[in-house]
Amino acid sequence: MAGRTAEPEVIWARPERAGRGPKPAYSRADIAAAAVRIADADGLDAVSMRRVAAEIGCGTMSLYNYVPRKEDLYELMVDLVSAEYDLSGEPSGDWRADMLGLARQARGIMRRHPWVVRVMSTVYGISPNALRCIDWCLACLEGLDVPASTKLELFGMVNGSVMLFVANEQAVAERARSVPWSAEREEAVRGAYLMSQVMTGDYPHLAALYAEGVAPPDDPEATFDRILTRLLDSFDLKSRPDPAR
Amino acid sequence: MAGRTAEPEVIWARPERAGRGPKPAYSRADIAAAAVRIADADGLDAVSMRRVAAEIGCGTMSLYNYVPRKEDLYELMVDLVSAEYDLSGEPSGDWRADMLGLARQARGIMRRHPWVVRVMSTVYGISPNALRCIDWCLACLEGLDVPASTKLELFGMVNGSVMLFVANEQAVAERARSVPWSAEREEAVRGAYLMSQVMTGDYPHLAALYAEGVAPPDDPEATFDRILTRLLDSFDLKSRPDPAR
DNA sequence: TCCTAGTTACGTACGCCGTACGTAGTGGGG
DNA sequence: CCCCACTACGTACGGCGTACGTAACTAGGA
């Protein structure tokens, strides 16, 4: 009678099995896996309560016994793909190498599951696998002499920067894909518009930058490593290997 | 007859007045202002084509003459609030101070218009006011001796980091607001759950961190400045003022 | 000058969505 | 043993984005 109204709470605090009635026919893992399968195949927008319910083979509204709000479904999805982190090895002692490796793994996950980038901003971030990841990160940073709060900042910045980087990669790819004509043509169209704007003279410094020839983009992996290394260095400036540049 | 089908293109490349038929009754500025008003008042989810049309006083489908897809409406909204950047002054010569100032302005805009954070990830980012902002940024970085591509990276990282920071601020605030009971109670509930997890022993380093007492959070402004200063320093390591710490 | 073709304005309708709510069946704890 | 919390699920509501058809209008070419 009461209790039907949605009380906001963390889904991870809600026990999967409530003990009293008939035992649930499905598990959270089943549901999360189904949702991830749909998102991987047809994109995040294809993940609807109806579709997920159909995928696991139950009625739409039955899903609400397992997942009180759709936001919680997202939470399950992110936790599931976060299980893909390989944190089996011990920290190497070189925390920067470890963190770069973690960042590369994060990028890998986001490339395998492009929807993660969009969902992550909605999600609370204390799922079991998120905690596992933070804990491993803290283990790597044991030797780094900064306050605990700074370590958390570091974790946030690394994660966030990977998100920003991948989001940018995806935007470029999406731009090319979502268009009826070819990718080159699309890039040409956008480039032409940008050029026309620069040529108005309203943006002199941008014009100068394009005039002197904008840098040829090196391969994405190198760019990624460079950006992350720079970021990591900024947390440990006193022991930088090469302060000359 | 043809041409009714949506051809993806940048809205900024589409002329506001098409020249042939009757002159439009409204302007893009009107529409953007209406949408921003709604989003500021009732949140981003309240911004629907129907609601915006009602706000400016036209039929729902008339809106599609001005804004071919809803995504383009978002583009207009972001451009409008980007006009709030005050870029009137000349660059001071201290590019780090200028960039920090720009970041503070960005944070101010995102605080006045919380929905911007969510929308920004959808948006292409070559609106007139975005270009104006990039151009001013490049002017500030005139004296910085790094490749042009690095300057663009810097701009991206500063903007992105502000987004991450504000998104985090908003998540904390939202968590407290979206709940029927009080903010303290909510923080207590979440904290209790987090503690219960930490106490399981599955996350030893996190437990150690909490045991030694997690840092008392200083005021947000100081944290913001510290994070951004650290980031900016990382782009100009050879001239850091205090390499000792 | 007039005609016509492209544009604007807008109502209707379709197929989705999240989810409130009611009802029926089930099985474990007191 | 039996009661009631819990599971399962169909129906229904109010919203969404937008395809499409139609009528009014006006600027450019004849």
Image (cartoon, coloured by chain):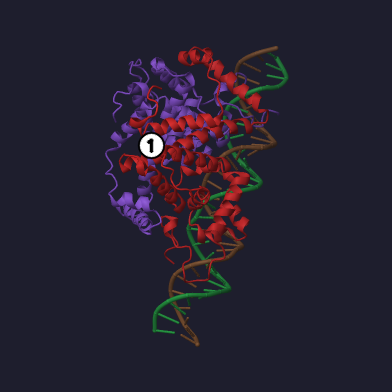
Chain colours: A purple, B red, C brown, D green
- A97 in relation to B115, above or below: above
- B52 in relation to A60, above or below: below
**Residue B236 location (% of width, % of height):** 35, 33
Image side of residue A108 versus residue B176, left or right: left
| Residue in the foreground of this view, choosing between A144 and A99 | A144
| Residue in the foreground of this view, choosing between D3 and C20 | C20
The residue that appears at 51% across and 51% down in the rendered structure is B83
Is residue A168 in view?
yes
Where does the N terminus of chain A fall, quadrant-wise? Answer: top right
Amino acid type of disc 1? Phe
Image side of residue B167 versus residue A206, left or right: right
The residue that appears at 54% across and 43% down in the rendered structure is B109
Tell me the element at label 1.
helix
- A100 in relation to A119, above or below: above
**Residue A29 location (% of width, % of height):** 47, 26
Image side of residue B26 versus residue A183, left or right: right
Specify few, some or many for label 1: CA neighbours under 10 Å numbering under 14, 14-19, or 20 or more. Answer: many
Reading the image, the residue beneath label 1 is: A165
Q: Chain of mark 1?
A: A
Quarter of the image where one finds residue B108: top right
